Image (cartoon, coloured by chain):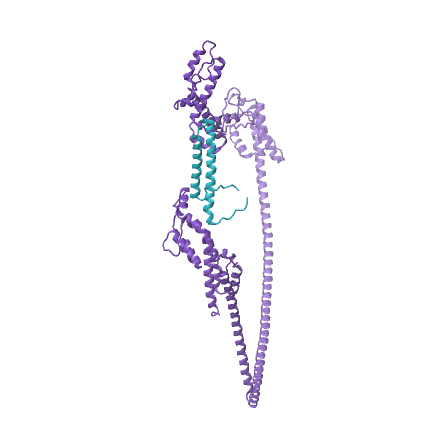
Chain colours: A cyan, B purple
Amino acid sequence: MSAVKKTTSEQLLNDKWDVVISNTLVKTALGFGFGVVTSVLFFKRRAFPVWLGIGFGAGRGYAEGDAIFRSGDAGVRIVNP
Amino acid sequence: MLRITSARVVSQQQQVVASRLLHSSVARLNVTNVPPTSVPGSSSPTAPIENPTPATPSTPNLSSSASSGTPPPRPSQEPKKTYAFRKFLLGVTVLGAIVYGGGVWFALRNDNFHDFYTEYIPFGERIVMIIEEREFQRRFPNAGRKPLEDDKPRVTVHRGGATWKMVGDEYKGPSTGPHVSAVPKDKGEQKAETQKDIVPAPVTPVPAPAVASPAPEPTKQEPLVIKETLLPKLPKFVFDGTIDPSLENVVTSINGLFTALSKAGAAGPEELGALAASLGEVSNKFVTLKAKYESELRENLNQQALVFALQSEKQEQDYKQQIAAVDEKWREGYFEERQRIMDIYKKRLIAELKEFNQVYSARLRNEVAAANAEKDRSFAEKVVETVEKERDSRLSKLKELKAAFEDVTALSAQVDSQLETAEKTAELQLALGSLTNALQAPYTVPLAPIIARIKEVGGEDPLIAAAVAAVPVSAYDGVLTPAQLAARFKLLAPEIRKVSLVPADAGVAGFFGSWLLSKLLWKKEGKPKGTDVESVLARAESALVEGQVVEAVREVNSLDGWRKKLAEDWLAEGRKRSEVEFLARVLGEEGKVWQYKY
């Protein structure tokens, strides 16, 4: 493991925002992908599954962002040593 | 690239396909006067919703016109039966089965999933249990049956206690005996049996029964006629050892009597007379013997008495001699002991006398020496007196000189100690000055060596020691200057502003809203009163500009929640600086007072 970079307390929220925004983007993209796949496979290339997938992804991202802001550990993945 | 198409476009495509197919089939059939069928653009907007009926209006014409030849293939003219609902049901069932089965399989593998599965899925537990039981049966087919009977050696334990057995014809007791028949035994056998008993025994008391038996016998002169069959066989006396010859006669006569008795069953008087005579002989012999033995015994006893008397006399004399000897010994011992004790006392007395003499003589000598010394002293005094008188008491002047000299040395020692104190004070002041300089420098100065120096110089003073110990360890590397703290605060302030409107327990929306709306807040300057974030920040800023770190730290400390959390690091640095400043002031004051203590 690389050395942990010491961040000052002023950057605390900025780091959290980084995590939240990147997480939301990733989840939205994933939702979009699933929506596309579902639409092609099951729904005859209609548009609504894609929007549904985007909505799911964004919602997940938002909820996780809420959790990250509310408690300290939500965005942190603990790896067993 | 996927094109997102709408239902309308899909149906239009289908219409195009259908019309193309139609055209091709028409071309094949060589029918020329068929008007072009529905063009995509001309179809009604509402029709496309029903997909399966794009070109229905035109088909009957074609079929009727083409019925002359073979019926054309109608690939897509009729309404398609898509069985959508059935397909849907089938799909759901298949999917459900797969998921169910997959769930069961996964539940068998994974423990957590097993718990979840058995709890939440209906009939899940049952299926899993069935499968598990089957597997168990497969692996351990013999479980539950009785254990094997042939392998291990068996140990049979007898039932304790008595057992019963049928007593039948097997058991037969002794064959002979009175319980079988009462017929007496054969005589020969009887005699052999009884003789065995009597042979080992020595002389049985003969006189009593023998005397008894002839007494009644001679009175009865008629012979005893006893039937042979009723008499038991009388034994014959047989002896192992030697017997008196007179007794031998008795024995033979008794034997003769017994044989006669046993033979004829009658005892003749001549036998009995002989027996009596022999018995009388025997008794006479006994009497004489007895008398002889008695006399012998008496003689022996007398002899023994004499012997004992002699022996006792001799023993008495022996004892008397022994007593006399012991008495003598003790007397001697007593005299010896007395002599010894007297000797000891004499020696002790002599020794004590000698000691006393020595001590007394020493005392006398001491007195003599003291008298001599006294004499010498008075002589010396007289000499000093006269010398002094002669030389105008110069000796006392010498004494004064000595006293003055001693005074001077004391004074110089005092001066030395004071110089030491002054030196120490100067060093302490230097150290404290260096501390103050370090705090006032425009860059961070490591404080560890300065603190060490202060401790070295002024460590005896408890206040200085306490102040030095109170310096936080993190400050040893140095503290930030007010300018540095101000610069850092400039970085901190915008972050705090971003968070200034965050409500309690906020999520993404709260933070985002706070960031957005805080841009609309007025920025304050100077020293405004108020507890809102902007006022606090303004007051802290102005305190820092003035160099009042303590005030600034106090202001920032009054924030709460996320604002304080962001400011934590800055606060730590500020607190360090404040503490060190305070301690430096304390040390400075103490240093000023220090020189007056020592």
- Which percent across, then down, holds residue B446? 52, 58
Q: Quadrant of the N terminus of chain A?
A: top right
Observer-nearest residue: B272 or A81?
Answer: A81
- Which percent across, then down, holds residue B325? 60, 62
Q: Please say if A61 is above or below A10.
A: above
Observer-nearest residue: B139 or B111?
Answer: B111
| Residue that appears at 39% across and 57% down | B527
Observer-nearest residue: B590 or B166?
Answer: B590
Q: Please say if B54 is above or below A9.
A: above
**Name of the residue lying farthest toward the left:** B530
Q: Please say if B386 is above or below B212.
A: below
Q: Please say if B346 is above or below B187.
A: below
Question: Can residue B573 be seen from the camera position used here?
Answer: no
- Which percent across, then down, holds residue B222? 52, 25
- Which percent across, then down, holds residue B88? 43, 23
Observer-nearest residue: B531 or A70?
Answer: B531
**Name of the residue lying farthest toward the right:** B242
Question: Can residue A60 be seen from the camera position used here?
Answer: yes
**Name of the residue lying farthest toward the top:** B68
Q: How many marks?
A: 0
